[in-house]
Amino acid sequence: MEKVLITGIAGGQGRLLTRRLLENYEVCGVDVVQWKGHPRGVEIHKVDLRKKAFEDVVRREQPTAIVHMGFIRGFDQGEETRHDVNVRGTKQLLDHCANHGVQQLVVVSSSYVYGAFPENPYHMDEDCPLSASRSYPEIRDLVEVDTLCSAFIWKYPHIRTAVLRPVNVLGRYVHSMAGRYLRQRPRVPSVMGFNPMMQFIHEEDVSEAIAQTLERGLQGVFNVVGAGEVPLHTAIVETGGTALPVPEPLLRRGFDFMFRWGISSNPSGMLDYLKYPVTLSGRRFVDATRFRCLFGLPEMFDSVRQ
């Protein structure tokens, strides 16, 4: 069996993906935290991607493929730490792929890299610029990681590299920005005068998309889109909340204050994603894989309510 190494394996998405891949692959993984009760036969290494110990793991395990999800997505550990782990850790991983015979690499990026702007077209394709750092500098590391990996595709064409950009992920186990926001029940603050269209995808469908990317040996950049889209206020209601429109200057000051004092993990740059649509076209991925979502919007919203 081919061997897949998963970075960030102890996170919610890593655990779901592990169980999905065990049907067809030998699986091992690395993380900075332990996964107690992991499936038998799955080797877990507690290492930092930035350390030499990670290279030792790659050399020893000799994986056929690597799925890279070992990012800091939140802001609890500070902007400098987040940037160093995400950008330098990814650079180290890319070097190890090139030096140790890895044949396939899948990097799980995010739709957030496109940025939220009033001029955004509906259903953006993969050729649209990655402009998130213009208005949301706190996530410039995600843009840098995506750019590094996209360049790696052309620099090492013999390594089948795919960058996946899923839309807002919802589920019981994955802690995404959208999920944290919708769980602020019962009154969920929104920007007064704005109600953008939002796209969501279930965490299990993300695992399925990654698995199909590996199975088909995809190479390139792909948006991964879930089943349907709804206005933000509809998503709030369907997940058990009530939208609380707040004037933007007041809401932005509140976000800045709570973020500065550690009350909230969301910087005010997030507010643009509650104002302007970031809707993607997933046609390229569907054409390459015939991918069909297993979960619709009702199941996604139900997972948030639970």
Image (spheres, rainbow, N blue to C red):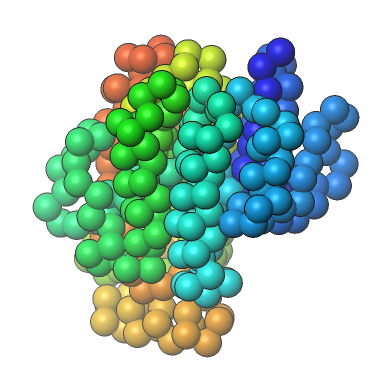
Horizontal side of residue 35 vs 166, given as left or right: right
How far from the left and from the top, in percent, is residue 50?
Answer: 59, 57
Q: Residue at x 26, y 82 (%)?
A: 249
- In the rendered image, the vertical position of residue 78 relative to residue 188, given as above or below: below
Judge whether residue 174 can be spotted in this image.
no
- In the rendered image, the vertical position of residue 299 relative to residue 168, given as above or below: above
Judge whether residue 117 can be spotted in this image.
yes
Horizontal side of residue 217 vs 18, given as left or right: left
| Residue sitting farthest toward the front | 99
Q: Residue at x 47, y 72 (%)?
A: 79
> Which residue is nearer to you in this view: 279 or 1?
1
Horizontal side of residue 212 vs 2, given as left or right: left
- In the rendered image, the vertical position of residue 274 relative to residue 68, given as above or below: below
Quadrant for the N terminus, please: top right
How many numbered tags mark residues here? 0
Q: Residue at x 32, y 14 (%)?
A: 287
Q: Residue at x 38, y 68 (%)?
A: 138
How far from the left and from the top, in percent, is residue 140?
Answer: 35, 61
> Which residue is nearer to you in this view: 100 or 235?
100
- In the rendered image, the vertical position of residue 206 relative to residue 167, given as above or below: above
How far from the left and from the top, in percent, is residue 212?
Answer: 51, 19
> Which residue is nearer to you in this view: 86 or 182?
86
Horizontal side of residue 181 vs 124, given as left or right: right
* Res. 186 image quadrant: bottom right
